[in-house]
Amino acid sequence: MGQSVSPVLVLPPTFEQHHDGFGVQCVRPRLSWRFSCSNEQTRNWKQTAYDIAISSNSTEPGEVFHVESENNVLVPWPNSEPLNSRARRFVRVRCYGKYSLFDGRDNDSDHDSVTEWSASSLLEIALLRNSDWKGGMITVSEPWPLGPDHSARPLCFHKRFHLSLKDGTIDRGRLYATSHGVYSVRLNGRKVGDQCLAPGFQSYHKRLHYQIYDIKDLLVTPGWNKIEIDVAAGWFASATSWARKRFIYGQKLGVLLQLEIWAADSSLPILVSTDASWSVSNTPLVSSEILDGEIFDQSLSVDSKLDNAKFSVRESPLAVSRLISPEAPPVRVVERLEAKDIFKSQSGSAVIVDFGQNIAGRICVRRVQKPAGSKITFRHAEVIQDGEVMCRPLRTAKARDIIICDGRELLDWHPQHTFHGFRYVEIAGWGPDDENCPLTKGSIVAEVMHTDMLRTGWFSCSNDDVNRLHENSLHSIKSNFLSVPTECPSRDERFGWTGDLNIIAPTANFLYDTAGMLGNWLQDLYLDQMEVTEHWRQGVVPLFIPNSLLRNGDGGHGWDPMPNGVWGDAAVMVPWGLYRMSGDISFLSRQYDSMVQYLENGVVRGQDGLWDPEQWQFGDWLDPKAPQNDSGRGTTDGTFVADCFLIASTQIVAEVAEKLAKPVEASRFRDTTLRLVHAWRDKYLTAAGLVVPDTGTALSLALSFDLLPEGGDNSTKAQAAARLFRLVRLNDFKLTTGFVGSAFLSRALTQSGGVELAYAMLFQKKCPSYLYPITMGATTTWERWDSMLPDGTANPGSMTSFNHHALGSIANWMHADVGGLEAIEPGWKVFRVKPQPNKELSWADTAFESRYGRIELRWTLEGELFRMRLRVPPNSTAVVSLPSDGRESEVGKREAKEQRVGSGEYDFECQFVQTQWPPKALLPPWGRAEF
């Protein structure tokens, strides 16, 4: 049979982990492509080969490379010749495959087919070496000027240059830029790009990200052009913690820029680079810091005042580390929220704007005009208490922006180089009663900012409260994936805490394509982990990345190395999770030494090889029974938590070594895992087979990490499951777990046969519970289960954030067990479909954009009839399990309970009888009364 035109479409290829091909820092980038198919009769489509066409011009067909392979994820660059800096290629793909057609009852025989060519993707290689940069980092010759609060005052470096090219003869224009600090660029008065807070937060002394912009359409030719680059303290020099120490990475800010203009008839570019010939001036910003916000003096926006700066320019004395074009997408404004309400504060001294959603971002004032010298102050807060913005949880962060007006109209003003975590903004000095320019809902918007990752996962169901719970987790992940994965966007931390990320990563990896962002962050983790100073112990994983609180001699501003379980295990578990989600083995090869260093040098061990119990541990952080200001002292021993994670990490490293073809090391780590499991059982199992400590967190971890002996109904594992079931019922389905335990509890219950108990916990609304914050109006995940107390006041504990993603890990259970989607093979080549319905829900929808295409699953429950609609993308396989005893499956067929299906659209149904709902709590004779 000859080849027919395939009903499958190939989407444009991508390169490495970049969302697009602009600025790839790789000489032979790997390619991936996804599929789509709208023909409902097409099933079991499998790729057998592919063609890649590569050309230097979009109008040429290019050279075609044919490869016999079923792989469409991260396939090798087909040309053996490496690409050079700035190389441009147009790449398109077509695929060969086999498929069958479904006639309503059966699938017919295989059809050979070839797809149409995909649309072309532009690949443009970045500057691969520091030597590709012809200029240098520039700064001021004098000490860096300070603002009134002693912060680094923002400055503007600028240069004029003349182009004599004829109009229409520019082939392309590229601007490469970075800074010590955060920067923004203008060309001929127009902002370059839509990025915010570039180059982002990173380990500046080891790697420095730069950005690439297409500026062809902003150039004036023939004629004069002016380029300006503002630089502010950002993470480089702000007081970025409770320690309030500034200039952590250097005493001077600086900028590095290279402009390349290519004429159509020339093989060499016109270059404009930063050097001593540039000028420097003030900006209207009197101060700008990450935690404290900005002060904008409108009167200084007059050019004559800006150019009055008394500074000279020189090359920066600070070394420029390796320059990297990151795989992570940039921070952008991704959404704008209109004001929902404006009201006077209880004291009457200010007005408060409510945007209806807690976010990370900034405000934008659409229009304001006030008399000269008038000052407008914007204070940001997450909650209201007693009719006032509640700023105590921010601790030392001012989270305040100020406009000093000069009488002129000010349009579309927003802070340039900072962000805040907020739902509410208190405004002093401007209100609805102003005669000339009253404050209205239309006067101000909130701009949502985060790293602009592609959305990949979705979940919704018939219960509005559960949907809000899921949305809160989503919003907190967005808010805290801003350049680095922070713990909260509001108070005086905003660090890349390793433990918090380790807990939320499985959830985040489903909802977003995190590979580029977290891959970059992991490289900084390794570099900071291997810091070479007298104040650091190599191999120890810092508590947050970048490690900007690294102790600095006798005048140190940070912490000594603090080895810790869960937090340190992020070095192993985060790259492993990225590999499982993406299928990219480079996460393992690149981070392997980091993993080994952690196990061999980053763990303080006792004689049994487990953690030394004298080493303090964060443990199940913010267990609801922990003291308000001693959040690690919960009901589950922190060393127990750390030991469980240590065993899991050791087993993962054994698997990683095997996948990387390191058999000797794989065997060594497997043997170590077995020894640690035996030591764990000797330490934590009683003679009767009970787990000590007997807590929800301890039992969930023991079950989830498979640490317990099996063998029949009376096995230790069965006893642990029974104990966990009893504890959940004894606590009336309220939560007893903190950061760590909450990430494992529901899945441990479900996998042990207690899914009804997991659902009972999901629907509980009394504090502490998943839905309690929803009843209190939460729009993001809280740091504590009771960050807001039932009386509407903020928890007095110092750890009280209202936008903290860790406890949102319940969404992972929604995706995998309620929705029923989970990867079996890395990259979702084979995935599991196993929904666990409950009669309290009449339907649930789950979708995931895998590396093969879109997976969609919808189930409905009408009485005892369970129906499921499933879409499997081309070139992948689903392993389907229905919530029945296997008597019925796909409509019209009788098959085994578990079955494998190829690509296509399927309808399933079965009888679902739920006899154990609702489960009963173990209550005292007087019931739920509290004394």
Image (tube, rainbow, N blue to C red):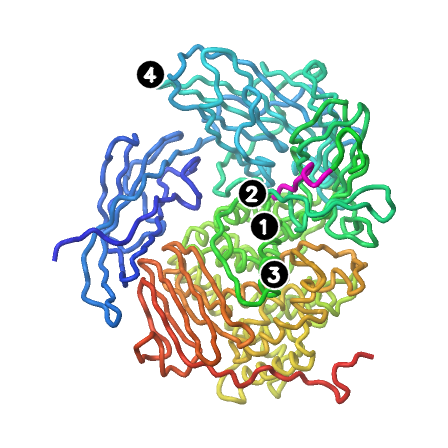
Q: Amino acid at mark 3?
A: Arg
| Label 2: few (<14), some (14–19) or many (≥20) C-alpha neighbours in 10 Å | few
Q: From mark 2 to mark 1, how far is it between C-alphas?
A: 10 Å
Q: Is residue 443 magenta?
A: yes
Task: Give the mark, 4 or 2, whose residue is nearer the N terminus.
Answer: 4
**What is the C-alpha distance between the residues marked 3 and 2?**
20 Å
- The numbered mark, 1 or 4, whose residue comes first in the sequence reads 4
Q: Amino acid at mark 4?
A: Asp
The disc at residue 334 is 2
Secondary element type, mark 3: helix
Disc 2 on helix, strand or loop? Answer: strand
Q: Which mark is residue 478?
A: 1
Q: Dividing the picture into quarters, in which one does residue 891 lie? A: bottom left
Q: Is residue 602 left or right of residue 903?
A: right
Q: Nearer the viewer, mark 4 or mark 2?
A: 2
SS at circle 1: helix
Residue where numbered disc 4 is placed: 265
- Name above or below for residue 350 compared with residue 564: above
Q: Are marks 2 and 1 in contact (CB under 8 Å)?
A: yes
Q: Residue at x 65, y 33 (%)?
A: 416
Residue 384 rendering spot, x and y as whole percentages: 78, 52
Range of magenta residues: 440-448
Place residue 736 in its image quadrant: bottom right
Of labels 2 and 1, the one closer to you = 2
| Viewer-side residue, 254 vs 870 | 870
Q: Amino acid at mark 1?
A: Lys
The residue where tag 3 is placed is: 468
Give the CA separation, mark 1 to mark 4. 45 Å
Q: Residue at x 74, y 64 (%)?
A: 786
Which is more foreground, mark 1 or mark 3? 3
